[in-house]
Structure formats: C-alpha cells, structure tokens
Image: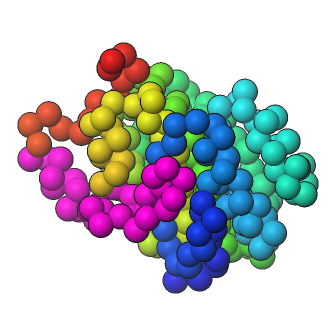
Amino acid sequence: MCEQSITVGSQSLKGVHHICCFYDSSAQLEFVFLPYLEQGLKQGERVLCIFPEGQHTHLRAKLEERGMDSTQSTEQLQILTEDETYIAGGSFAKHRMAGVLKDFLEKAKNSSRPAVRTLGEMSWALRNLPGTDELAEYECMVNELCTTYGCTLACAYDINKFHARVLADAFATHSHIVLNGVIHENPHYMPPQEFLSHVAHRRSGPGKVRADWV
C-alpha cells in the first residue's frame, strides 16, 4: 500500500487515492495542484501530467516559479498532450488509455522511482471524438490501477464545460473529490463493479460527453 505524503489544496493525506478536481478557473486548479506536483518532484516520485499542448509552457513556468526544474529528466517528469495519450489516433479507447497508464506504472514499479502521481486535465473529452462515452468506464479502470499499484491518480474537470450527468458519473467514480479548492473523502464513491452494475440498469447508460449541452 502506498504511504507517500500527498498534499492537495493545502491538505495532507496518505495512501491510495483516485482524485477528481471539479474546478471553475485555471487559478483554482493551480492552487490545488501545483503544490501536489511540486511535492511529488521533491519526494523523487515519477510525475505525469496530461494537459492541452497550449498549456505546457505555462505549467512549466509555474513549476519553475516554485523552484522546480521543469526541464529535468523525463524519467521523473513527463508533460504530455491529450493527442499523445487519451485520444491518440483521433479516438478514445478505455482499454488503450488504461494500458498507457499501466505501462507507466509498471516502468515505475521496476525502477528506482516506484512512487507515482499523475494529473490529467479532462477537457479533451469535449471534442466528442469516437469512444468518448466510455469515459466513466475508464474511470472505473483507473480505480483498479490505483489499488493494484498503490498510487495517486488525479483528474480535473472544468465544471463550466461538462454536462451535469458527466460530472455526476465523475463524482461517483473517484474516491476523493475536490470542491471549491478543498479535498474531501467521497461518501458517494461507488466501487467499479457497483458503478458498472448501476449504469447497466440505467436506461440512458453513462452520461453522454458533449460540448453543446447548454
């Protein structure tokens, strides 16, 4: 079981977490997760960030403002785009993306830096590419990876952009939730099999991911 210290929104935690941050501004997201990323780097962990390509320079600059060398070896810090990961090849496939994470975790497990923390910004899903409606099922698979590898994996959803049904599914599939910059243990979290059973009996299936919901 993972026992590295995790700081999210100024609160310290220990253990395995699948974190969902509901944010409404870039400033709020930075307040919550820059200390989390900085801490991982200082503790010698492997840190993986998946952000839109246009935000990479800003993210690196913010880390450098906090005294981090954002150009350090790719073994410790990787900042990738959604096109390299979630939607490589122009579509989303839950098993493929879970495999990307699993490969990353396996390499860490067998290295001198076994501890891992990640942060994935989820607005790529609003591009409505094929397979995107597998998102909630993918989040269930991430829970299993957290447990298997004893790590902390985090997702960030902009509440101004996503349909309420998608946010509700995200709420149900993460063990910890960030609301208004504060992290909470999620009393409404549903273990993967329970959630999938619930969705299977839901007439409309998982929440549809689309940008034109307003």
In this rendering, the answer to whether 3 lies above or below 58 is: below
Q: Position of residue 167 (x, y in %)?
A: 35, 41
- Judge whether residue 183 is colored magenta: yes
What is the x, y in percent for residue 112?
A: 78, 76
Q: Nearer the viewer, residue 187 or 111?
A: 187
Residue 164's image quarter?
Answer: top left
Tell me, yes or no, if residue 175 can be seen here: yes
Q: Is residue 78 left or right of residue 51?
A: right
Asked whether 142 or 107 is in front, the reply is 142
Is residue 45 in the magenta section?
Answer: no
Relative to 55, is 63 on the left or the right? right
Which residue is found at the position 20% from the left and 62% from the top?
194
Identify which residue, 103 or 180, lies in the foreground: 180
**Residue sitting at x 52%, y 30%:** 124
Q: Quadrant of the C terminus?
A: top left
Chosen colour scheme: rainbow
Q: At 43% from the left edge and 64% from the top edge, which residue is drawn?
A: 184
* Residues in magenta, as a range: 173-201
Q: Is residue 193 left or right of residue 104?
A: left
Is 123 placed above or below 197 here? above
- Say how many tags the image has: 0
Provide residue 141's location: percent of width, then percent of height: 39, 56
Q: Is residue 102 visible?
A: no
Residue at 44% from the left image edge and 72% from the top image edge: 147
Q: Position of residue 44 (x, y in %)?
A: 79, 71
